[in-house]
Image (cartoon, rainbow, N blue to C red):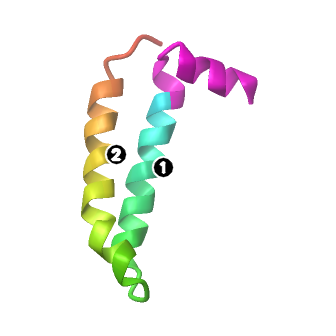
Amino acid sequence: MTKFFSGLMRLRRGPWEMVATILIAVGVFMLMQPFVLWAFTYSFIVTLIGTVMFIIVSHFPE
């Protein structure tokens, strides 16, 4: 766990890609669920932030 937070603080690719991937997955889940309107409303922006974040952090050092 401390290795994960250490990687976040040192701007390493692995932990930040995991965060971006989780954001994308949460955004897709928010898009597909039919019960909570606010989650559906913000699903596109969450997915977009995760995608842009993944593109940016893919240039971070390993």
- The residue at which mark 1 appears reads as 22
Q: Quadrant of residue 59?
A: top left
> Where's the N terminus, which quadrant?
top right
Q: Residues within 10 Å of mark 1 (few under 14, many from 20)?
A: some
Q: CA distance from mark 1 to mark 2?
A: 8 Å
Upstream in sequence: badge 1 or badge 2: 1
Span colored in magenta: 1-15
Instruction: Provide residue 51's location: percent of width, then percent of height.
Output: 28, 44
Residues at circles 1 and 2 in contact by the CB criterion of under 8 Å: yes
Q: Residue at x 25, y 39 (%)?
A: 52
Instruction: Provide residue 6's location: percent of width, then percent of height.
Output: 64, 18
Residue 12 lies in magenta, yes or no?
yes
Left/right of residue 32 with respect to residue 12 in the rendered view:
left
- Above or below residue 41? Residue 15 is above
* Mark 1 residue type: Ile
Q: Secondary structure at mark 2?
A: helix
Q: Secondary structure at mark 1?
A: helix
Residue 22 lies in magenta, yes or no?
no
Q: Residue at x 55, y 18 (%)?
A: 9
* Mark 2 residue type: Gly
- The residue at which mark 2 appears reads as 50
Q: Residue at x 44, y 33 (%)?
A: 17
Q: Quadrant of residue 15?
A: top right
Q: Residue furthest bottom?
A: 35
